[in-house]
Amino acid sequence: MEWKVIQLILWLIAGIVSFYFSLGNARVWTSIALGFFLILIGEFIPQAIPFLPGIEVPYIMAMSMVVGTIAILLLSHGFQEYYVFSRTLELEGRRRNVYFVTAAVIAASLVFLLINPTPTERTLEIIRVVENANWVFLSLINIDLIRKIYLNVQDSPISKGFLAFLAVFFFIVLWKGSELYIQVYALQELAMEYPFRYHFSLLVHNVGSVLASITVGATFIYLARVLR
Amino acid sequence: MIFLPKGISVKENINPARVNLPESLKKLQKAGFSGYLRFASSAGNGVVLFDAGRMVSVLRQEGAGVKRGAEALTDLFEFSMEGRMALHIYRLSSPLVARINGLLQAPARYRDQEVKLIDFRGLLTKLKSESFSGGILVYADERVALIFYEKGEPLGFFNDGSGEIETTADLSMSVARLPGARITLLNAPAQPEAAPSDLLETVDPGALWLEARSRVARRMKARQSEIERKKALQEEEIRQKVLAFLKDVASRHLGKMGVALAEKEFEKALGEGRKVSAEVVEEFCRGIARTAKLVAGPSTVNAMLLEIRSGAAKLL
């Protein structure tokens, strides 16, 4: 079975689990769970293209990458909220607002794409680089944030969940970082010249994606068991 | 010396807190009253002696200390206002008052000697040989007798229920025979002072009354603030106990974050100046249930709430 199919199935499961988790839990989890759910849309519509005929429309490709970027922004926001909660024990906002604001940002992004020229191959490539760069650097920041959250909630029932999130973001860094590396150095075009670098990066990208999807699904299943 | 025989009862067991004492003293003065007012309390006694309307002596005794005159009268007013005393009024004949007044001024030679431990007959012989003048106060429980001596000879007796100096010794001696009977031997001048001055002419009972009132007010204020301080300490103690309990339970169910959550939610539930109560604990439970959901599941939270509710009920 191809890497893309495995990734698609695993992220589909992870996305469904995280979205289901976002519905029945405390407000602070909404951004985190919704962020992981958006990975399903943002990342795997492009992955599913070979299996979904007629989806090569550049707007859809561009939109999926924008949603991917929104996903990591939402995740980072969620972990920041949890960190603030773990420090101040104060929590504000409503779950409904998170859904509305996320939907509004996605809608605004769509409008932005539609009022601009049809994305070319180059535009899509730049959007993809921006998305991956966001993922890599925000994931690194999230790793530090989650480490701090873990220290704050160390011996609470949920603490192991944050260790799992550390693993999730580690795999995401591998997954997105290797793709960014390929993009920045255009290794796809230089594959003949640098075969090891290209193939190793591609392997790391695929393995990272699979492991990230498995850990996301497993983490939310674990959290659901602890919190419900 | 404050234990005097009762005399002829005019009024007994009055609560002096309900009496305007300066006015009452003026009335007794106007009525030419002879006798004494006895202020009794567990802490000490007081005597106000009247002779034909003249307030001739005021004494207050507390423990071994004796106060006289205005100072004693202020104390009696003060303790009366506080409801710490019972007032008894007894009528006596003027000569008896004069004799008692002499003794009230006298120093005690022996005080509170237990009769069974002394050679009573030997003492009487000794007093005779010394030409003793004064009085022997004999008392046991509530019964009191006073034997007056002059130049070594018994002059007369003052027994409970009598307003005169009597010549029969039986009752006095029967008090001496009661279990636990004690005597106090008082020296006195051979002749009582001819006409002691009227203290009502030299002191202003109204002013003393006001002074006593302000003292009582100060003391009550101090007492009130002491009560409030103790109450606050007690409440703080309960608060600390309950908080320690809540932190302990939260820590066991939620880890160290539970401790912080418990502190925060407890402060929130207490709000401004609220005392720890079942309502506060209930509010705390609602608050911590909301925030604990972020770090633990419902079964953990419910088990914690159950333990908090049952444990806190025992502490309150």
Image (tube, coloured by chain):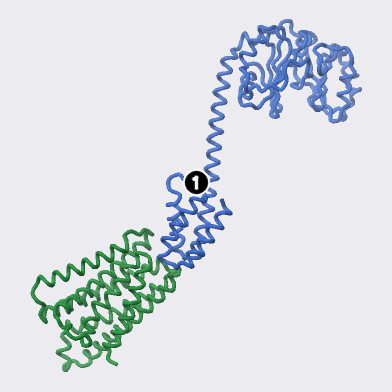
Chain colours: A green, B blue
Say which element carries label 1. loop
Q: Residue reaching furthest top?
A: B194
The 10 Å Cα crowd at callout 1, few under 14, some 14 to 19, many 20 or more, is: some
Residue in front for this viewpoint, B89 or A119: A119
Relative to B126, residue B288 above or below: below
**Coordinates of residue B224 in the picture (x, y in percent):** 54, 34
Given the image, on which type of amino acid does mark 1 rest?
Lys
Residue in front for this viewpoint, B297 or A86: B297
Report the number of discs: 1
Q: Quadrant of residue A203?
A: bottom left
Tell me if A68 is positioned left or right of B66 in this view. left
Q: Which residue sits at x=26%, y=64%?
A: A100
Q: Which residue sits at x=71%, y=27%?
A: B64
Q: Which residue sits at x=56%, y=58%?
A: B310
**Coordinates of residue A45 in the picture (x, y in percent):** 23, 81
The N terminus of chain B: image quadrant:
top right
Tell me if B275 is positioned left or right of B122 in this view. left
Q: Which residue sits at x=56%, y=50%?
A: B316
Tell me if A196 is positioned left or right of B15 in this view. left
Q: Residue reaching furthest left?
A: A117
**Coordinates of residue B100 in the picture (x, y in percent):** 76, 14
* Residue denoted by label 1: B275
Tell me if B242 is positioned left or right of A195 in this view. right
* Chain under disc 1: B
Q: Quadrant of residue B94?
A: top right
**Coordinates of residue B209 in the picture (x, y in percent):** 58, 18
